[in-house]
Image (cartoon, rainbow, N blue to C red):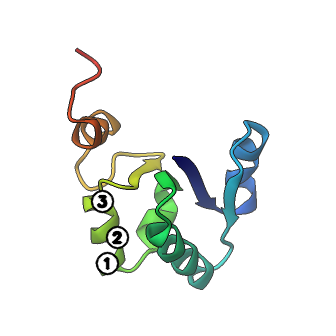
Amino acid sequence: MEIAVIGNSEFILGFRLAGIRKTLAAESDEQLVTHVTSVLQDANVGILVLNSGDMERIPRRLRTTLENSVKPTVIAIGAEEGGLSMRERIKRSVGVDLWK
Protein backbone atom coordinates (compact mmCIF):
# COMPACT_ATOMS: atom_id res chain seq x y z
CA MET A 1 0.00 0.00 0.00
CA GLU A 2 1.14 3.47 -0.88
CA ILE A 3 0.49 6.89 0.58
CA ALA A 4 -0.55 9.58 -1.89
CA VAL A 5 -0.37 13.30 -1.17
CA ILE A 6 -2.18 15.88 -3.28
CA GLY A 7 -1.81 19.63 -2.85
CA ASN A 8 0.09 22.69 -3.91
CA SER A 9 3.84 22.44 -4.33
CA GLU A 10 4.54 23.88 -0.88
CA PHE A 11 2.21 21.37 0.81
CA ILE A 12 3.68 18.29 -0.86
CA LEU A 13 7.33 19.32 -0.46
CA GLY A 14 7.62 18.08 3.13
CA PHE A 15 6.08 14.75 2.21
CA ARG A 16 8.55 14.35 -0.64
CA LEU A 17 11.42 15.05 1.74
CA ALA A 18 9.99 12.42 4.10
CA GLY A 19 10.25 9.84 1.32
CA ILE A 20 6.68 9.64 0.04
CA ARG A 21 6.97 8.99 -3.68
CA LYS A 22 3.39 9.52 -4.82
CA THR A 23 3.02 13.28 -4.47
CA LEU A 24 0.87 15.14 -6.96
CA ALA A 25 1.01 18.92 -7.37
CA ALA A 26 -2.39 20.52 -7.89
CA GLU A 27 -2.24 24.28 -8.31
CA SER A 28 -5.74 24.65 -9.84
CA ASP A 29 -9.16 23.21 -8.99
CA GLU A 30 -9.16 21.21 -12.24
CA GLN A 31 -5.81 19.59 -11.40
CA LEU A 32 -7.05 18.84 -7.89
CA VAL A 33 -10.15 17.03 -9.13
CA THR A 34 -8.18 15.15 -11.79
CA HIS A 35 -5.55 13.94 -9.30
CA VAL A 36 -8.12 12.97 -6.65
CA THR A 37 -10.11 10.98 -9.20
CA SER A 38 -7.00 9.15 -10.42
CA VAL A 39 -5.91 8.31 -6.86
CA LEU A 40 -9.37 6.94 -6.03
CA GLN A 41 -9.02 4.57 -8.99
CA ASP A 42 -5.50 3.45 -8.00
CA ALA A 43 -5.76 0.15 -6.11
CA ASN A 44 -2.25 0.57 -4.68
CA VAL A 45 -3.10 3.70 -2.66
CA GLY A 46 -4.18 3.01 0.92
CA ILE A 47 -4.00 6.54 2.35
CA LEU A 48 -4.70 9.85 0.63
CA VAL A 49 -3.47 13.03 2.35
CA LEU A 50 -5.01 16.39 1.44
CA ASN A 51 -4.88 19.90 2.85
CA SER A 52 -8.19 20.74 4.54
CA GLY A 53 -8.46 23.89 2.41
CA ASP A 54 -8.18 21.78 -0.73
CA MET A 55 -10.86 19.46 0.60
CA GLU A 56 -13.25 22.44 0.62
CA ARG A 57 -12.43 23.21 -3.04
CA ILE A 58 -13.49 19.74 -4.23
CA PRO A 59 -17.03 19.48 -5.65
CA ARG A 60 -19.61 18.26 -3.13
CA ARG A 61 -20.26 14.86 -4.74
CA LEU A 62 -16.56 13.97 -4.91
CA ARG A 63 -16.03 15.29 -1.37
CA THR A 64 -18.81 13.01 -0.10
CA THR A 65 -17.11 10.08 -1.82
CA LEU A 66 -13.84 10.98 -0.10
CA GLU A 67 -15.45 11.41 3.31
CA ASN A 68 -17.02 7.94 3.07
CA SER A 69 -14.00 6.23 1.53
CA VAL A 70 -12.38 3.42 3.48
CA LYS A 71 -9.78 2.53 0.85
CA PRO A 72 -8.08 4.82 0.40
CA THR A 73 -8.52 6.36 3.83
CA VAL A 74 -8.59 10.11 3.34
CA ILE A 75 -6.77 12.30 5.83
CA ALA A 76 -7.34 16.05 5.60
CA ILE A 77 -4.60 17.90 7.45
CA GLY A 78 -5.44 21.19 9.10
CA ALA A 79 -8.87 20.50 10.60
CA GLU A 80 -11.40 17.79 11.26
CA GLU A 81 -13.31 17.09 8.08
CA GLY A 82 -16.86 15.87 7.79
CA GLY A 83 -17.26 15.74 11.57
CA LEU A 84 -14.76 12.89 11.80
CA SER A 85 -11.48 13.23 13.62
CA MET A 86 -8.35 11.41 12.49
CA ARG A 87 -8.93 8.97 15.37
CA GLU A 88 -12.42 8.14 14.08
CA ARG A 89 -11.16 7.74 10.49
CA ILE A 90 -8.43 5.33 11.57
CA LYS A 91 -10.92 3.41 13.71
CA ARG A 92 -13.25 3.12 10.71
CA SER A 93 -10.52 1.95 8.34
CA VAL A 94 -8.70 -0.43 10.71
CA GLY A 95 -11.69 -1.54 12.76
CA VAL A 96 -9.97 -0.94 16.11
CA ASP A 97 -9.50 2.15 18.25
CA LEU A 98 -5.70 2.44 18.38
CA TRP A 99 -5.81 5.05 21.15
CA LYS A 100 -7.24 2.64 23.74
| Mark closer to the observer (2, 3) | 3
Q: Position of residue 35 (x, y in %)?
A: 57, 73
Residue 22 figure quarter: bottom right
Give the residue at x 44% y 64%: 55
Instruction: State which tag comes first along the sequence, 1 or 3.
Output: 1
Residue at which label 1 appears: 60
**Alpha-carbon distance for marks 1 and 3?**
14 Å
Residue at which label 3 appears: 69
**Alpha-carbon distance for marks 1 and 2?**
5 Å
Element at label 2: helix
Residue 59 figure quarter: bottom left
Asked if labels 2 and 1 touch by Cβ distance under 8 angstroms, the answer is yes
Give the residue at x 48% y 46%: 77
The one nearer the camera, 95 or 33, is: 95
The one nearer the camera, 73 or 11, is: 73
Element at label 3: loop
Q: Is residue 39 above or below residue 77?
A: below
Q: Position of residue 13 (x, y in %)?
A: 76, 49
Give amino acid for label 2. Answer: Arg
